[in-house]
Image: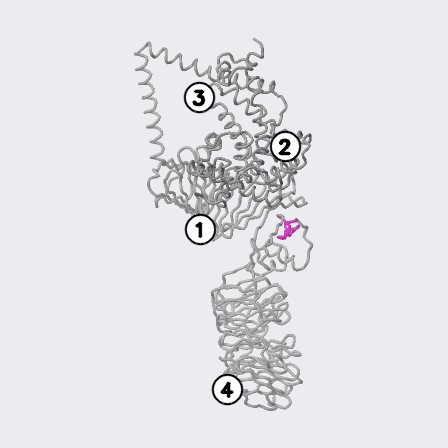
Amino acid sequence: MKSCENVKDNLLSYLYDLLEPEETKEIKKHLKKCKNCREELKKLLKIRIILENTPYDEPKNQLEYILNKAKQIEQKRFFTNFYKLIFFSNLIKILKKNLKLKVLIVLLICIIFSIVGTLYFSFIKNSYLYVLKSYGNVKVNNKIIDFKSNVKYNLKDKINISILNGECILQIDNDKLILLKDNTHIILYSKKDININLTKGFLIGKVIKAKNKKSLIISSGNAVFKVIGTIFFVKKVENLTELGVKEGTVKSIFNNEEFFVTKNEKIKIRGNNIFLTKVLSKKEKGVLNIIKEYNLINRFDKTKKVYIKTSPKQCEVYFRNIYLGKSPLFFLTDERMNNYFLIKKEGFVGKEFALNKNEKDYVIDIALKKGAHFSINWKLKLKNKIFTNPFYIDNFIILSDSIGFIYKIDCQNKKILWKFKASRRIDSIPLYLNGILYITSNDGYLYAIDFEKGKLKWKVKVGTLVYSSPQYYNKNLYLCNNTGKIYCVNIKKGKILWNKKFAKGFFASPLIYNGNLYIGGLRGNFYSINLKSKKINWVFKTRNRIVGSNPLIKNNLIFFGSNDRYLYALDLETGNLKWKFLTNDAIFTSPLLMQNSVIITTIKGTVYSITIDNGSLNWKFDTRRKILITPYIIDNRYICVGTKDNIYILNKWGILYAKFKLLFNGFTVCDNKNLLLCGKDKYLYSLNLNFITGGEQK
Amino acid sequence: MNKDEYKNLSDIKIIEKFIEKKDDKIFEEIYKRYNKRIYSYMKRFLFYLSEDIIQELLNDVFIKVYLNLSSLKNFNTFKRWLYQIAHNICIDYLKSQQYRSAEHYNFDYMIDRRIDIEKDYMEKELRKFVFQEISKLNDDVREIIILKFYHSLTYEEISDITNIPIPTLKYKLKEALTTLNRKLKAEGFINEKL
């Protein structure tokens, strides 16, 4: 028997027939005996009665509507069935009567299928490439093709096509036309979809039958794209690939992303970024619409619309990601580069270019990068090779060659005014004061030369090897030599006032500030020397020697680089370390100042920009070539870096926008316009850098 | 023939006659017999939809019945078949629409208007409370309760209509009922004397 509690638990399911038959019997037995349980059951019954006795709701009577609609649908069904019946039943009846017809029809169907099948399969198995027209040097599989040739190739094998000069029109299976132009190298693979691997050059193609979904697969560099469209072109210049499609779809095989292009849109792919742009029609003059930008690797996708009110005839868009504070900026310029627009990341609102100085730099940079070039102003032949940097003073150039001759050259007339013979070559920067030139030579002498006539005023022996250039302070000249001595020389008569040994050797130029002389020594110590008392104020120790890096002073801080790969910033008065910055290699060049940041280069070839306040990195640029000459800063905006055989021009954000391949030993920049180069062919060149300052272009 | 002639016939014979003649009057009889049931089933199952939509759904059900009645093989299962059509149409509608949760709706809507005539206040309140609790349940469980109690179908029929096997159906029903019972006890409806 079951207890009362057990029964009470199961009463509910008993009431609603949820129990198994054996259990229901037991509960029935229990209920006959137990009063409490019966009352409990009555209470529960109440809910059941309420639930079951609820009347139904009444809907609106819409019988007519239902009947009408049902009959309409029935009629439609009837007609479709009727047509089916007529056609099929007649055929079946006829076939049943005539056996001959039956056989004939079966035979006909078989023949049609076989013909269609053979045709279909033959087309798929063998796809052919036709060379319709060609002129110039066109090579297919290393064989030169004649003019106006019509050659057929089976696409079973790889086909290499390279065009050095001229054009070539290809056709694949009567469907696709491809136009190849100068300097293209492509490889075709045969599959159902035809693969084109473009290694270099420019390619225009046309796919006529887009419905068949036979597509061209174009791969160039990282990006592989499947193009199902009508007209497309591919351009490859170095690492950048551009793919333009009019009408159709582009599918990137990298991650199966598809982009649809309609009639008025254009797709452009640069590197891993995809841009969908709207083509300008005549009515929409001056309205430019960037619809979508998509990054394939970072998957950073933004749909945005930009409207700009101008009326340029042709609006060309230069897209460029500049990562400044992690926000990409885009710039638009028109063809003549008169109007500039800046589109910021937030909101993507088109804004007429406000001509802030900072922002103007961006635009000019980007606009000119494409057409950066230089022109040679003049050149002058010299007798001997030149290994040093030229020195520029007011339209005159001071040069010293490998033997020890010092020249003065007039920039306007391109003539040598005078030459002066020192016994050995000169490596230091000369000092020009009141019409007199002070030069230290490797023979250990300090020369004072009259600037106009080139005659010697006086000379003084200051050691055996002097790399440092003289510094003027308080009517005296100060310089240091390789033995670690500091000399003080009278400027008028050239007499040595005093000399004192401070370190093992000095291979850099000193700097004098507020009566103190600052210099780094061969053992890695950096000195601050009081010139009146001739005593050391403080010494700072680095881990390796300091060679070639002249100090720089700004904001009560002194900057210098050492061979232990660090750039140091010390307090001027106490010599305490403010900060230090670790670079990737030894520093041989001196630091430069540019708008609240220090520019430093290392031997490995990287250019660093470091903020003065924190010592944190702004940007860095890797040239991957040795840098031994300190760079020049042009107009406080550009950095001119010379490596062994290249000249790089960076802007203040560390973005390269011009690079020239030149063979030279030394260079300077004069008047922010011209680049003076000492070429390896004994020539002195003057190059025009007008494009930097925004002058007229040729 | 008079209208009254059809009234006394059973379901099976009416359907047979309809398939023979395709008379509108016979269909009217079928419509009148099942019209209210299906409407109230749909209205309680999808109580959060507006009346107009349910009316449209009801029309769809009877259009389907008119067109497909001839394909019904066993006339004994006509009632089940009708509910199946209604169920399928409801589910299709829910799939097409992203229906919202039941929280935002007034439950007064659920109460039949004729209840107001009844004098017993307690019963009225109890009814209202039960409707509220039912409407808070999930769609599938609510449908089972509605079919079982309002329309007094058997478990086999319900499992045919909703495509849920009988044991799971029973389990779901039991769980729902126990929770309902517990809530009724907590509100004090059950301890009242009859």
Kindly indicate whether the residues beneath marks 3 and 1 are on one polypeptide chain.
no
Kindly indicate whether the residues beneath marks 1 and 2 are on one polypeptide chain.
no
Residue A340 falls within the magenta-colored stretch: yes
Q: Looking at the image, which residue is at 65% across and 84% down? A: A515
- With respect to residue A187, does A508 lie above or below? below
Of B119 and A417, which appears nearest the observer?
B119
Kindly indicate whether the residues beneath marks 1 and 4 are on one polypeptide chain.
yes
Which circle marks residue A504 in the picture?
Answer: 4
Q: Is mark 1 on a helix, strand or loop?
A: loop
Q: What element carries label 2?
A: loop
**Quadrant location of the N terminus of chain A?**
top left
The residue that mark 2 highlights is B50
Of B102 and B155, which appears nearest the observer?
B155
State the image coordinates of residue A364 (x, y, percent, origin top left): 62, 56
Q: What element carries label 3?
A: loop
Q: Mark 2 lies on which chain?
A: B
Query: Which residue type does callout 4 highlight?
Result: Lys
Instruction: Mark 2 vs mark 4: give the one in front.
Output: 2
The residue that mark 1 highlights is A221
Q: How crowded is mark 1: few (under 14 residues within 10 Å), some or many (20 or more)?
A: some
- State the extent of the magenta-drawn residues as a range: A335-349
Q: How crowded is mark 2: few (under 14 residues within 10 Å), some or many (20 or more)?
A: few
* Prevailing secondary structure of the magenta residues: loop
Q: Inspect this view and state whether residue A698 appears.
A: no
Query: Which residue type does callout 3 highlight?
Result: Asn
Residue A251 falls within the magenta-colored stretch: no
The residue that mark 3 highlights is B74
Numbered circles on residues, count? 4
Query: Which residue type does callout 1 highlight?
Result: Gly
Query: Which residue type does callout 2 highlight?
Result: Ser
Answer with the quarter of the image where residue A119 lies. top left
